[in-house]
Each structure stands twice: as structure tokens, then as C-alpha cells.
Image: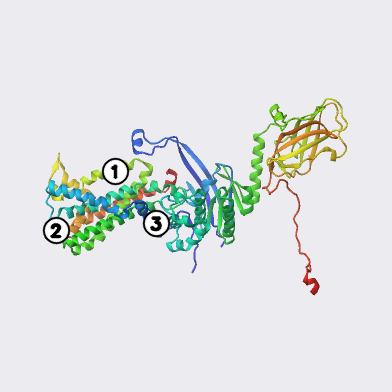
Amino acid sequence: MTTTPTTMTVRERGNMWSYRSLIWNFAQRDLKARFKGTALGWLWSLVVPIATLVIYSVVFSTIMRMKPPDFGNGATGNVAVWLWAGLTAWSMCANSLNSSIGALLGAGPLLKKIYFPPYAPVLGSVIALLIQSMIELGIYLVVLTAFGNVSWTWLLVPFWLVIFAVFLSSISMALAVLNVHFRDLAHIIGVAIQLLFYCSPIIYPMTLIAGKSKMGIPADKLISANPLTQFIVIFRDLTYGLTPGSPLAWLYITGWTLAVAWVARRVYRARALDLSEEL
Amino acid sequence: MTDPAVRVVGVSKKFTMHTEKRNSLKERLVRGRARTDGDFWALTDVSFDVPRGTTFGLIGNNGSGKSTMLKLLAGVHRPTSGSVIANGRVSALLELGAGFHGELTGRENVHLNGSILGLSKRQIEQSMEKIIDFADIGEFIDAPVKVYSSGMYVRLGFSIAVTVDPEILIVDEIIAVGDEEFQRKCFDYMFELRKRGTSIVMVTHSMALVESMCDQAAWLENGQLKAMGDSRDVVRRYLDNVNDREVAAAPEPAVEIPEVAEVSEHPRLGSGEVRIVGLEYLSDTGSPAPVLLCGDSATFRIRYSATEPLRDVVFGLGFLHETGVTVAGPNSESGTAPVPVLASEGFIDFHVPRLTLQPGNYEVSVAAVNHGHTFDHVDRGYKLRVRGAEGSEPGLTRMFGEWTGGTSPRVLVGDEVLNA
């Protein structure tokens, strides 16, 4: 048996797996830095979503008199729980984009002095956010259990979560890299995220817009085409409606995720490897 | 076995220069792509090997590409062409305390840095005690690094870089930081690493350090490899070049007639029958030189003008090192026959076959006296620069000699004599 010495250029030290402890360290750094010096610490990650939920519940159940769909187990629907489903998925998306877009700029001082793959801080930041979101998700599932709305379809949630995580990290990666080259991208994305909120069925059900169009533009088709719509619809189907979701929707989000991952890879290859000179 | 630790093959690095940075989408849309002001080649076609287990020095003037080279070795930048190949784990110390996050504690930063270097959590835990111990920062390890003093910052940075047991260590100018005690600790540790077979690549401006620590060195100039090989040779060639350039940059002869201001500063004494009008330095070729080389022959030519012929004049020279120490004070009395001074202009030469002054800056006093009577005394009126063709030794003068060795017969001492 011959052992060949591990000859490699300085940068090719390993794949993503071999950098897992670094990615995890960045995630930890994000989590610690976020809650350090705050009296409530981790509780803060719950204050914002709960406050949002309370506001929406009041607005939609008492002012707008929205009637939520029934639970999957046949019980009468609950506005707060129904909204919580959409908001959980939504906040995963919005928060991870918002925070990871600056991940590379934040790691700039490090990247200029020591080499590590630039994806590490971005993935770390996405992971930190997903962990935070797990609390929201957990509370949501506990509430559903209290309503007796549990089914085998919950077992599909992890699959959904993995696809969503890859989808979000790919977008985050591309945006974080581009944000180094175009420092105002973060502002644009901030506006885009707001727009996206209303273009996704978070505070309204898809049934509300079925068949509607304006100036010949079919609103329902447009909103269905939004990949985030399908992510939210599937998530709500799995947890609230207790149906496995339409295979077409699953296919749709998988297709989008692969496409976005491919684009992110292209952007990374083209732009991320000389970042230390741009920072 | 004979694989080099680091192999640099035909590496070039280009930086694109922008007059103005356009790094926002708005500017791109409004004003188009940024104009490039041409390219700057920081390195062109540099190749060298760092043999395993050796210490390698990179020398050169500021802006010669040394730091760019280190950044390429550390992987921070990518070469534009060519390749940098490392056999083993590289730990780089480009700027001490480089990878610290201010909000995190020292301990957390150790974890972060350790994982950047590719260590597992367990390996980091194992080194933790050693790192804290070496950095000598006590309980500050659990305080956020933003409250650290600069010394603590530096110490922790160095500790992490060296205690993670790197196979290849890349160090940039470490001697410039830290107090004396820590510097010594650093050198001891680097020496230790060297003994253990760690390959070290360092950039420094201290030629003495290169000569003492490095086995090999490379000299970069304007991004090109000028010389490479045994560190002493490379340092010598580099210093020669610097000396030549200094000579070329200061072509005016060394005749410096002290100006009035200088004279008033250091009062000019003497009755004035003989006046010192100049001092020239002649190199070993006999031509005037602005700089003299330690170890070469040199001639000091004192120019005087006299108002009347004098028989007994003793000329003296006083060499003061820039630290204020008088290093030597030769005078013509101890020489051969006294030199008669004729009326009008003349000169007297003091020739040394081998200049023993160490490289440095000196001030020279010149005096013309006779049995306690002073004709003229120019106190510290002339500047002398001595440069070395070799690296420096400690001390103000150099003792030229030969080192030889042999085996000595066994000498009986003390009890052994009695027992014999």
C-alpha cells in the first residue's frame, strides 16, 4: 500500500463537511453575540414573533373578521394558530436573509487575515437563525397538540425543513457575496422582503385570491408562482390541514431549491474566492 | 521525505487599481462600471521551495511584495497565476490577534480560531490550558476580548497560532510587538517549534534575526525574486544592494565644512593658526565615499589650512557613536614621524586597514593640538555612516578574528589529581 502525501494548494483543505466545526462556531458566535448583554437573553427571540402574532390575531379576528379554515381534525379553525403557521415559515425566510446578507462583511476582518471558506460565516448565520426558529416551530407544534390536531403528516416536516434550509442558505450565500460588491444590496433586499410578505399567503389564504386578476394580470397565478408561497402552503398543509400537500407543490419547491443552489454556486465560484481583496 | 513543506511555483499576483470604488448598485446603475487604472503586479513569477523543517525568511524593501507573498502562503489571497502548495496544516500569524471577535470572550475566540485552523473541538479543549498558560492572561480569558490591553491581545493571538501545533507556521514581523519578556518567550517557542520540525516562513526587517533564525531566505524586490538560498548569502547580497543604493542616492562628497550653526552649538575652540576645513572619507578604492563599510579598509583625510608653518602639530580624530559613546580617538602623536604643517592648505591621512566600527551612525570630532595647546577643535562636526556588508553583531566595534577548533587532552582536576 502506498500512501501519497496530502499535497494540495493552501486553500483546498477540505470540503464543507470538514469545516463543520467552523460553521458551527460561526453559528454559535452569532447566537451568543445576538443575545449577549440583553436581560431576557433567549426570550427575545420569542418576543418579536409573539408580539406580531398578537397584533395580527387582534386585527384579523376582531377587525377584519377573518374566518380561518378548519383544523385538519375537523375542529373549527383558530385565527391565531392559523396565522402562526404562516408567520413561522415567513420569519425563517425573512430573518435568515436579513441577517446573513451581512455575514461576509461582518467576517471581513477575519477573512483578510486568515483563510477559511467564505461560506462558513454565511451558513453559520443561517444555521443560527434556523435554531432560533425551532423555538417558534416548537411552540406552534405544542399549541397544535393542545388542540388535538396531530397526524402522521408531521413526519414530513423535517423533509420540508431540509429543502427550505437549502433554499434559504443558497439565496443567503449569493446575496452575502453580492453584498460585498454592492454594499447597498442590503437596503434593496429589505424592501424586497416587505414586498414578498404581501406576495405570499401569510395573512390571507390562497382561497381568498382564487380567480382574481387585475389589469389582465392573474394575481392568484402570480402568487402561486412565488416559491415561498408553495413553501408556506405545504407547511400549513402538513401541520394545520394535516394533509401531505400536493406532489406538484413538493416538486415545485424542490425544483426551485435546486435552481437557486446552482445559481448560488455560480455566484460563489465567480465572486467569493477573491473576497479578501474587496473587503 | 524530500517533499518541500511549501512549494511556490511561478506565482504572480495582480491587483486591480481603482481610482474610486464603486461598490454600490446605485453607482453602478448611474455611472457604469468603475474605471480601472491599470493593474498593479505585486508579484511576478516567483518560485521557491521551503524545505520541510527549515526556517525560511522573506526579506526586501517595503513594497517589495513580501506581505503579499505571505498572504498567498496563508491562502488569504489567491495567486493570479501559478500555485502555492502546502504540505501540512498552515497556521498564519499575519497580524497578531487577527481573528478575534470583540464581543466574544478569549475562550470563545480560541474556539473560533482553532476551528478556522481546522482543529476539532476536542483538540481545542486539549490545547486550551496551554494557550491560556502561554498567553499569561489569567482570568481575562473569560472576558470579552474588546476589554483586552493590546499586549493581552497580542499574547493570546500568538499563543493560539503556535500552540495549535502547526506543521507550517507563517509569521509576519512578530518582533515588532509585545514586551521584551514576551518577545523572548516567542523566540524560545519558535526555536522549540523549529527543533520539532515545524517549517517556519517569516517576514522581517531584522537582518540579524534572519541570519540567526533562518536557514534559507528569499529576497524580493518589486515583486520579483532577486535572490534565494542560504540566508547569510542572501542577506549579504541584499545589504550590498541597499548600501550601493544609499551611496548612489548621496553622491556629494563627504567634505562637510561645519556651518555656523553647528559651530555655535559645539563651540569651536583653538587659537586658529591651523584650521580644519574638511574631513573626507575614502573607501578602499581610494575614492571619496559617503558611506564606509565595516571590515573594509578606509582612509580619513583631514584637510586644513594654516596661516604659518608649524612643526609640531598633532591631529586627532574622535569617533562618537550615535548613542553618545566615544568609540575611538586616534591621534597622530602615536603614529610615526610628526607631520610638518606648511603654510597654506594641506591634508593629512589616517588610514585603517580594516574599519572596526560596527554599522551605525557616528559623529566625528577633529582636532589639531600641540602639547596642550589647541589650534583648532571641531567638536562633533562631521557625520559618518558606517554600513555592514554582513549582518550586525552586538557591540560598537567588531573584532576580526578566526574561529578554529580541535580536541583538547583530558585535564585532571581536583580529586582526580589526588586519586591518580
The image position of residue A176, as x and y in percent, is 35, 47
Residue B213 occupies which quadrant of the picture? bottom right
Q: Which residue is mark 1?
A: A190
Q: Secondary structure at mark 1?
A: helix
Q: Amino acid at mark 2?
A: Phe
Q: Say the numbered circle drawn on residue A71.
A: 2
Chain letter of mark 2 equals: A
> Counting residues from the N terminus, which is met first, the one under dot 3 or under dot 1?
3
**Type of amino acid at the residue the image marks with label 3:** Asn
Distance from the alpha carbon under mark 1 to that under mark 2: 34 Å
- Dot 3 corresponds to which residue? A25
Residue A56 in the image: x percent, y percent? 18, 48
| Mark toward the start of the polypeptide (1 vs 2) | 2
Query: Badge 3: few (under 14), some or many (20 or more) residues near its Cα, within 10 Å?
Result: many
- Left or right: residue B360 versus residue B57 is right
* Mark 3 vs 2: CB contact within 8 A: no
Q: Earlier in the sequence, mark 3 or mark 2?
A: 3
Q: Is residue B166 visible?
A: no
